[in-house]
Every structure is written in structure tokens, then in C-alpha cells.
Amino acid sequence: MIFLLWSLLTLPVKLVLGMVKLVLRVLGFIGLSRIAAFGAGIGVGVAMAPKPASQLRNGVAAQEEAKAARGGDIGATVRHELATSPRTWHLPQPGVTVQGDRVVLTGTVPHDDARLTLIRTAGSVTGVRAVDDHLTIEPPTP
């Protein structure tokens, strides 16, 4: 019983000493100068920030809401995403028309995998609820 009580009383001391040992080992491994340089970099970055992070987040959210309120330019965003995505930039680019929050893809593609990739990429754009597939697969040339 006394052993259990002694263990419970000395547990906080053991935890603190263990944490101190851990901090000293980390300091020895990484180096105090590197940690100080990292802290100085964070301090300079915070001091040079144009606005607090909360104001920047609120500004971005306001821009997104304004874009959504005016209907956004979903068609241009989908065209840009299809033209720059690593999975679709090399494929023939389809025609993109927007009907509300639905995107209609028209044109020809070389194979079914390309059609599915174009549909998935267009569907991943923010604001697109559905993708209507009007893509045709061009027959292979002999």
C-alpha cells in the first residue's frame, strides 16, 4: 500500500524529469542554433505578415462567396482545370458549356479511359454538381 502511494506521489516528478531529458536530447540532436534560427524565422514571418491570418481567411471566404453569388465562372474554371491537369492536358480538349451547376462536355476523345478522366476532372471542380457526358469516342485509325 505504501509502495502504491509512493508511486503515485512521485509520478509527476518522474514525468517532469522525463520531459526534461527528452528536451535535452532533442536539443543535442538538432542543435540549439538551428532551433533558434527556426524560431527567429517564425518571428520574422509573423512580424512581416500584411494582415492577421483570420483577416486573410475572411477575405478569401468573402471572395468565394461573391464569386458563387454572381454565378462564378465555372466554365472557365473547368476549361482551365482540364487544360492544366496532369491527367488531361495531353488529351483533346472538349467543349465546355454550363447549365446552372451542370457542366456539359462535348467533343471526341481517343478512348474510353480519356472520357472517364475528363468527366472525373470536370466533376472535381468546385461548384460543379453534375457532368453531362456528350463525348464520343473516335474510332481507331487503321
Image (spheres, rainbow, N blue to C red):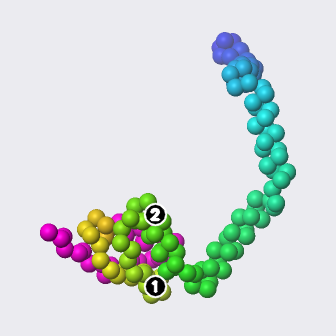
The residue that mark 1 highlights is 98
Residue 5 % position (x, y): 70, 17
Residue 113, label in figure:
none
The answer to if 121 sits in the magenta stretch is yes
Res. 138 image quadrant = bottom left
Q: How crowded is mark 1: few (under 14 residues within 10 Å), some or many (20 or more)?
A: some
Quadrant in which the C terminus appears? bottom left
Is residue 66 at least partly visible in the picture?
yes
Tag 2's secondary structure? loop
* Above-or-below relation of 120 to 49: below
Res. 87 image quadrant = bottom left
Q: Comparing marks 1 and 2, which lies closer to the viewer?
A: 2
Relative horizontal placement of residue 4, taking residue 140 as reference (left or right): right
Check the image and name the residue furthest to the top: 3
* Above-or-below relation of 81 to 30: below
Q: How crowded is mark 2: few (under 14 residues within 10 Å), some or many (20 or more)?
A: few
Write down the region rendered in magenta: 117-142
Q: Distance between the residues labelled 1 and 2?
A: 20 Å
User: Residue shown at 57%/81% (left/top)?
Assistant: 72
Q: Which of 3/26 is in front?
A: 26
User: Residue shown at 36%/68% (left/top)?
Assistant: 91
* Above-or-below relation of 34 to 48: above
Residue 37 % position (x, y): 78, 35
Q: Which of 43/86 is in front?
A: 86
Relative horizontal placement of residue 63, taking residue 52 as reference (left or right): left
Res. 16 image quadrant = top right
Q: Which of 101/22 is in front?
A: 101
The residue that mark 2 highlights is 85
Q: What residue type is labelled 1?
A: Val
